[in-house]
Amino acid sequence: MEITRGDCERDPMTDIAITALAHRDLDFNSPLSDVRAVGLIHSLRPLAGARILDLGCGWAELLLRLLEAEPTATGVGVDTHEAALERGRANAAARGLSDRVRLEAADAVATAANGTGGPVDVVTAIGVTHAWGGARHTLEAVRPLLRPGGRFLFGEGFWERPPTARASAGLKARPEDFLSLSELVDLAIGCGYRPLAVSVANADEWDSFESRWCGGLERWLLEHPADPAAGKVRAVADEHRDGWLGGYRGVLGFAYLTLAASTAPSAPSRWVHRGSTSGRALGAGNEASDSRRSWTADAPDDGGMETAYEIRAIGPEALEQLRVRDDAGRVPRPVRDDEGGSPLRCCLKRSLPGEAILPVAYAPLRRWAAATGADPGPYEEVGPVFIHPGPCSGPDGDGVPEQIRGERRVCRAYTADGRIKEGVLVDPGHPEAAGSIEEALAELFASPDTALAHVRAVEFGCFTYEARRREG
Ligand SMILES: C[S@@+](CC[C@H](N)C(=O)[O-])C[C@H]1O[C@@H](n2cnc3c(N)ncnc32)[C@H](O)[C@@H]1O
């Protein structure tokens, strides 16, 4: 696509125009080869007579190839980028597809929320979860659009490896912005889909995508060495290349999930341990790996109602004491958290890459009992937690903290005399577990016997934070 500009002197090149230059050598606006595209189209069969909706279609190359593969299918693509849509419309006309495809300037989120005048057979959304604010919202928004058994081709980034500081900076992303591949698939299952095919961009597809992106700018620079916008375009190319080669190359992956709208009931029933102190191993893991697996489930809508409980971080007085001597009697030593992402119990946030953190032994029930006069006896436990080595901003409120929701948790309820009374497993991907922490705590605090609850990591049981019954 050729980019024409107005008077460069008076009208410096806009970000949109620079993006269009970066896109001009790309076939797809994601790391996707022709061979994989054929495989993805195959995975979405049967396509005869299919109604296809492409959310965030860009110039809609994959949608056009779907329509070429199946002459009885029709498609609608929506995007907010008019220049990309124009390119798609021109391609559709050149390939004789204009009568079977409509490319509209529209917000994908609003399009999905308003419905499409009846269920569709196939939805595609590739590289556009930021529009919904994450993978979960996207999966949830698309699900009602599909007929039972309909397919969703979902293209989304994931962490191939724990993100380094440079990878996060290169992507302008936080560790919790992406999941691991298995977490992403589990999330999709928890949102009411079954995975028909899982495919991942390989290193060649990534390098081809990124170098073509930068190459579009570099070619323009060669063609326009004296253009007043050359410095700006060169700076964009340099920053992008550095973020890719020096940052996220080999760290960020890109997955293509072919998902079927599950015909099984989507609301998970609960898996509850009642009156038992026994746990259940759901896989290997530890405090560190829990902190890396930092996908953040989104808060369920509580309708703005005040909950029966309030979430508490470790309080300021206890923190002061722990920083000097912890609950195991040790003098703690700070460590540098190179990768970041560790759950901090002082502010209920995650550490930043390179930040100093303090591992301490903490006895949550002992400290609660000391304040209430309870005698937990053998139920008292001491375990490892991370805190900031010095004073920090503390938690943002008394709701479930978004940054450290974790993939799976167990909510363990205690009576007023400090005995464990029941536990509820939280695992959005598990058909018999509670789907959210709020759901589990609401159930536990519905019982008047529950005085407080601990929210803990599942595999190693580490204390994450406390839920205390609200007073008054
Ligand atoms: C990474 S590109 C992927 C484009 C296309 N799906 C593909 O794979 O070639 C993301 C696209 O999402 C579009 N987009 C971002 N936010 C959007 C929104 N709220 N509504 C519609 N499109 C949006 C962008 O304009 C861009 O074309």
Image (spheres, grey):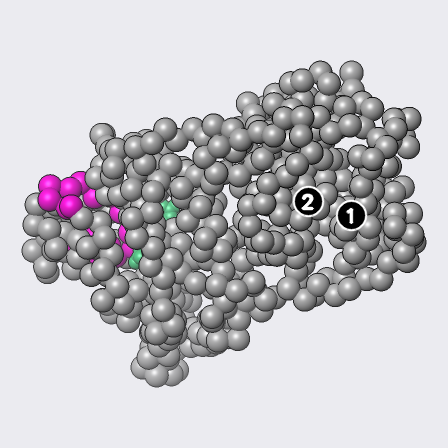
Indicate which disc, 2 or 1, sits on the residue closer to the N terminus. 1
Residue 434 falls left or right of residue 64: right
x 91%, y 47%: residue: 321
The amino acid pointed to by label 2 is Gly
x 38%, y 83%: residue: 225
Residue bearing the label numbered 2 = 461
Give the label on residue 46, or none.
Answer: none
Q: Decide if residue 240 is in sight here.
A: yes
x 48%, y 45%: residue: 133
Residue 471 falls left or right of residue 170: right
Tell me where residue 216 sits by quadrant.
bottom left
Q: Is residue 215 magenta?
A: no
The amino acid pointed to by label 1 is Gly
Is 82 rendered above or below residue 402? below
Tell me where residue 200 sits by quadrant.
bottom left
Is 449 rendered above or below residue 249? above
Q: Quadrant of the C terminus?
A: top right
Is 211 rendered above or below residue 365? below
Residue 53 falls left or right of residue 202: left
Kindly check if marks 2 and 1 are in contact, taking CB atoms under 8 A apart as contact: yes
| Element at label 1 | strand
Closer to us: 25 or 70: 70
Residue bearing the label numbered 1 = 383
Q: Residues within 10 Å of mark 2 (few under 14, many from 20)?
A: some
Residue 253 falls left or right of residue 45: right
Tell me where residue 175 sits by quadrant.
bottom right
| Element at label 2 | loop
Per the rendered image, the range of residues in magenta is 46-64
x 43%, y 63%: residue: 253
Q: Is residue 62 magenta?
A: yes
